[in-house]
Image (cartoon, rainbow, N blue to C red):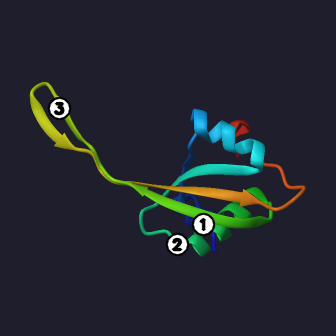
Amino acid sequence: MSKEHFYNIILSPAITEKGTMVSASNQVVFNVARDATKTDIKKAVEGLFGVKVKAVNTLVRKGKLRTFRGRAALLGDKKKAYVTLAEGERLDVTTGL
């Protein structure tokens, strides 16, 4: 697969408080495409960053109802991937690609 395809799967790193806490257990959190499978995510992380992935756990956060200037809007669903790296592997997503 091409790097362009990998960028369509991995949308962005999720740099949050919880994301920095799980980095202590050798995990990284990414926002991924809704139709991406665990094997797609694993191949994309290994292809983009050159690290060995041990496991991938995913979750879908359902969209929330928000009101903006008196109008109700439903935000879209988001999919996150918790990627566990193999022993001895390190990944710093704050430095960029």
Mark 3 = which residue?
67
Camera-near label (3 vs 1) is 3
Give the residue displayed 61% in from the left and 56% down from the top: 82
Q: Residue at x 71, y 51 (%)?
A: 27
Amino acid type indicated by mark 1: Ile
Asked if residue 92 can be seen in this view, the reply is: no
Give the Cα distance between marks 3 and 1.
33 Å
Density class for disc 1 (Cα within 10 Å; few <14, some 14-19, many ≥20) is many
Q: SS for tag 2?
A: loop
What amino acid is found at the position of numbered circle 3 in the picture? Thr
Q: Quadrant of residue 18?
A: top right
Q: What x and y, as percent, mark residue 32?
A: 51, 57
Q: Which mark is residue 41?
A: 1
Mark number for residue 37? 2
Amino acid marked by disc 2: Thr
Q: Is residue 7 above or below residue 75?
A: below
On screen, 7 above or below 37? above
Percent position (x, y) of residue 96? 69, 41
